[in-house]
Image (cartoon, coloured by chain):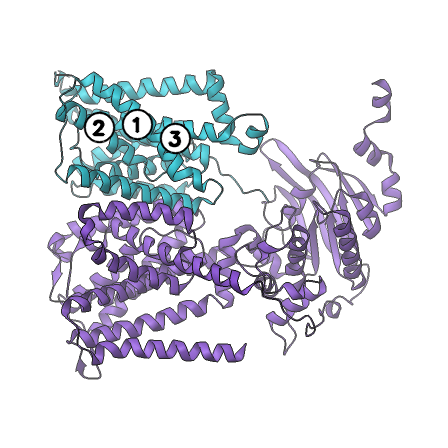
Chain colours: A purple, B cyan
Amino acid sequence: MPTRRLGGAIVFVAAAAATIAVPLVHPMPAYSLNLLMQASTYAIAVFGLTIVLGYTGQINLAQAAFFGIGAYCVALGTTTFALPFWIALALGIVLAGVAGAALGLTTLRLGGHYLAMVTISFQTILSLVLTNWIPVTRGPDGISGIKRPTVAGYALTDSGVYLALCFAALWIVGFFVWRLGHTRLGRHMQAVRDNELAAGVVGVDTYRTKVIAFTLSSVLGGFGGGLFASGFSYISPDQFSFAESVVFLTMALLGGVRSPFGTALGTALLILLPEWLRFLKVVYLAVYGAAVILIMVFMPEGIWGFAAGLVRRVRGAPTEPAASVPPLPLTTRTAQSDGTTLLRVSKISKHFGGLKAVDEVDLEVRRNEVHALIGPNGSGKSTLLNVLSGLYVLSGGEIRLEGEAIGALPPHERAARGLGRTFQNIRLFTAMSVLDNVIVGAERPGNPVEPGSSARDLARAALGFVGLADRAQRSVTSLSYGHQRRVEIARALAGNPRLLLLDEPGAGLNHVEKDDLVALLKRLKGHGLTILIIDHDMNLVEKVADHITVLNFGRRIADGAPGEVLRHPDVIAAYLGEVKDRAAA
Amino acid sequence: MGIALQLLFTGLGVGSIYALVALGFVLIYRATNVVNFAQGDFAMLGAFSMVVLCIDLGWPYWLGIVLTIITMALFGALFNLGVYYPLRHRTFLPVIISTIGASILLENGVLAAYGPRPQSLPGVFASQGFSIGPVFFDSQYLTILAVTVFGVALQYLFFERTLLGKKLQAVSQDKEMASLLGIPVAFMIALTFVYSATLGGLAGILVAPILFVSVQMGASIALKAFAASIIGGFGDVTGAIVGGLALGVIETFGAAYISVPYKDGFAFLVLFVFLLIRPQGIFGERVAEKA
């Protein structure tokens, strides 16, 4: 790996240096300079979409508005207010960022269609202001005579030199955006994109992550716009309209929105295409609209994503040697006093309208025990689990984890206090590798990572524990159903949970896979992990449970050691029906 | 007072256009969980079809209306096949973007075929309208209101009283369950697109005499109709109608008493306020994702 990394770095720096040097040493016609200036400043703004749409999966149909904020700050700053370029640019970036943050803070809790509509609204209102607030923006006539910057006493009036500056900015921003994808924040963004619900449960503050992504995106929009205004020295409101936002979006999608390389490629293509497609004249934009549909249908990951997929297929699925997998440090913090209460649930209820899905249930999970929660379909088991992990808001009652009330906390803060879980219908981060899925779990806030070992080591250890170390680099969707279940368990284990909630881990498994699951659960139990498990398979429950609670119609009907609970007449009645009913029939 | 009444009448007329288009949004959303960003372009196509048939070819008005509605129904089926159907198993984002692409294609296709010059279309009735006291009742606005009320009543009967309507409702609530019950889901969704395109085309026919017929006319109507459906409560039929009417009135009063250039901004300001205070809209309910 390190040699490949070094090689990549050398290629990257060499390519950057070459592109920056070309406009400095090689004189170009003004027309080419303008095209390249447009492409590079646009690409910086489109990188914003890589972050917000590609990494985080949130739509932004107002990137041209943020681009416009940056452009108008530089334009008005260097003309009306006679500010130095760099100060005007900084103002533009800050203003775009503040606008983005404000928009994100108010609407990112809604997401989806609402976000599309809100960004369109913002875009429309900004366009109206730019056109109609004539005393300040000079209206539809636009602003001319925008100044270029000065670097170390040297004015960049020459367009070739200015283009070199734009290129340098492009490479730097591109590098940071690429790097971001491999950081903790970047993984959080991708987790939110792939499965927001699961992201919250493994400890990602989804709202905060989305707001950061949206703000970063608008900052890049402002930066690109500022450079654009100064490059062309003239701007007008129609350059920052909704139609331009759609163009930005198409650039990102065409190239491949999940990678900055794809984004840059798409931007370059869509700026050069009109030049190549001049012969199409008026039909050009119609062809362009048709292209968007075709990309969505045939190349949903864009040109870059499509090519990367081909390369992966040729190389085959990567495997990792299992030899060097570290052991999972599960036992270190569970060897505390046995048998004391870890989770105490008092009289919790969850109502959906008039339906009492969970009705004043008490539950006590003791440390180092495997506690099973069983009951017929619709008895409220999954609802109870969802209330425990914070996906449903409590209707009443109290939840205490090691004495601390957690009933009002959002899912990620419960994860931070050591609550891990899996889902009945597997919820993995589908576009990420097996290892990255588990790393997100290992990176939960408050995870006691031992000194000298990284989240990555912990994730590999967790994968080793469930027997999937050699699949670490695979994409999760390429794994079998049973293996995906184990990845989900590894993701929870990597977070060193104090309490692990397993929601029907045996559902959909064949009997070989079920035997493996029982063996895995027994090993976890041997390590002293506290587990609350839901399952329908009595065989499985009997093999692993120390304690069983039975629910029916949202109420607790039995609680105790497996032997007595499973012989309890109410439990038998709940599962098999009343004996006298059968006799009557 | 006279002016206010006049504005109220005009606002309701404009608002019922938003309501008609919003209804199309809501129906497609309920059937597919996707917002169709080309909904406004259905109205634009309807208006252009009227211009071609009744002005350029000089055919009678009623024939133009009949042929336009048939064309739009066919177009809805085609739209479903080309823009939605290939993406039906994917998340909402690719589908939204695909409908945005369709919108660009439609607007620029018509632009290439017909040129940028706005066209005009006469109203259904020769008479301009009549006055009662200080209020002038424009015949076209009256037609729009009447058609909207009639259309909504018809739609209600269709969804509540016919088997086909019930099947469509079943599909919009749970596709898997509907298909297990033997309802042909793909066909029902195609029907929804046909119906929505027809509704959009109808809105275009009605609005053409009031506005100039241009390729951009659909986009601005659609954005406001979308805003209207969020204000009313997204996915709710009553909400779409109430939201549409409210938005038409607010916009008309805003233009008269506050500012004409910012007329198109009021709808979005109201939307912002709603999203901050009551994001589920007037009639909507908050729904949580199931784990």
Viewer-closest of A573 and A244: A244
Q: Earlier in the sequence, mark 2 or mark 1?
A: 2
The amino acid beneath tag 2 is Ser
Local crowd size for mark 3, using a 10 Å CA cut-off: few (<14), some (14–19), many (≥20): many
Residue tagged 2: B49
Local crowd size for mark 2, using a 10 Å CA cut-off: few (<14), some (14–19), many (≥20): many
- Cα separation between marks 3 and 1: 10 Å
Q: Earlier in the sequence, mark 3 or mark 1?
A: 1
Viewer-closest of A153 and A172: A172
Q: Earlier in the sequence, mark 2 or mark 3?
A: 2
Q: Position of residue B80 (x, y in %)?
A: 39, 34
- Cα separation between marks 2 and 3: 18 Å
- The structure residue drawn at horizontal position 29% and vertical position 59%, both measured from the top left corner, is A269
The subunit carrying tag 1 is B
Q: Position of residue A92 (x, y in %)?
A: 26, 65
Residue A116's mark? none
Residue tagged 1: B72
Q: Is residue A460 above or below residue B26?
A: below
The amino acid beneath tag 1 is Met
Secondary element under disc 3, as helix, strand or loop, is helix
* Quarter occupied by residue A39: bottom left
Q: Position of residue A27 (x, y in %)?
A: 17, 77
Quarter of the image for the C terminus of chain A: give it. Answer: top right
Secondary element under disc 2, as helix, strand or loop, is helix
- Cα separation between marks 2 and 1: 9 Å
Residue B193's mark? 3
Pointer 2 with pointer 1, Cβ within 8 A? yes
Query: Can the viewer see residue B232 in this picture?
Result: no
Viewer-closest of B167 and A287: A287
Quarter of the image for the N terminus of chain A: give it. Answer: bottom right
Q: Is residue A17 above or below residue B136?
A: below
Viewer-closest of A30 and B134: A30
